[in-house]
Amino acid sequence: MMAHFTAVLSEELGAARKFLTSIDKAKILLVFLFCLACIVWFLLGEKYPAATFASPYETFEALYWMLADRHNEYIVGIGETLSVFFRGFLGAVAAGLSLTLVMGLSPLLGRALNPLLDLLGSVPNIAFMPMVVALMGLDQPAKVTIVFLGAVLPVAINGHAALRQIDGDYEEAALDLGATRLRALLAVVWPLALPQMVAGMRVGAGYALAACVVAEIYTAMTGLGGLLVGYGNSFNMPRYFVIVITLALIGIFTTALLRYVETFFARRAGLISERE
């Protein structure tokens, strides 16, 4: 009887050990940090008045009234920001990847343009705003252009860096088999570099969202950027926190989507296993 009990206990302990080792420790740490942040948020909200720092309850109460507002100011703001953000970002991805392709087809051109792109990338995006506003006015096309300028350089720079990291033997082998340089680049080199290109798009998405908010503040004060300034200037911290959290969720969703795309292409290229 004792031997049977010991065997069952050993089996259960083995199963529990196997379950614990299978848990992603990074996800556990992420959940822990999220809970810690919520606790700190709650404690600070209890300590300071709503005009200085909003508590979780005050923030969610503000969210409820913003959603119930018959003018739909919050919903309209989200729509305006998403429109500017995605139009500018997708345009930057298309232009950045096209520039990456051109630089990959002509290594000499790539070496010549790379320092120029690094130089332009070091210039703060806000420096281009007066020129863009002077040329295009304060309407949505100017905002989309500012978002485009904020994202296109990180996409192009990271895309070209991804191409340069691929072993040149792959392209040479394709050329020896009779492929043109364009076909060798697109069929052999590009799939291997694509996961890192998508990682560059994640960097570009962060710049694009920041540029979108700054553009909305700098131009016609619309979208979530306009609401952010309006609530901040009136010290309406609960609604201000709602806007900040909404912007964070947009960034998190975009990053998570691009990370999924990056993992998908990495699996297709055989860079990671199916279990990862």
Image (cartoon, grey):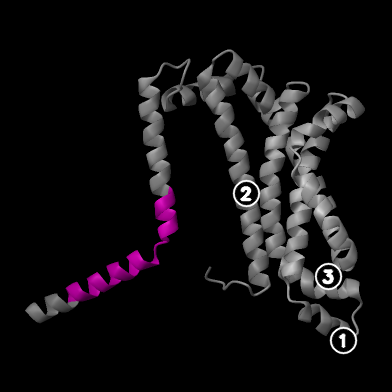
Disc 3 designates what residue? 186
Disc 2 designates what residue? 255
Given residues 14 and 26, the one toward you in this image is 26
Vertical side of 143 occupied by 119: above or below: below
Q: Earlier in the sequence, mark 2 or mark 3?
A: 3
Q: Report how far apart the C-alphas of labels 2 and 3 lie in the structure.
A: 25 Å
Q: Residue at x 86, y 31 (%)?
A: 132
Indicate yes or no whether the magenta region holds residue 21: yes
Q: Quadrant of residue 79?
A: top right
Q: Quadrant of residue 76?
A: top right
* Main SS category, magenta section: helix
Q: Earlier in the sequence, mark 1 or mark 3?
A: 1
Given residues 68 and 43, the one toward you in this image is 43
Vertical side of 49 occupied by 264: above or below: below
Residue 95: image location, x then y, percent: 85, 51
Helix or strand or loop: what does disc 3 sit on? helix
Q: Amino acid at mark 1?
A: Asp
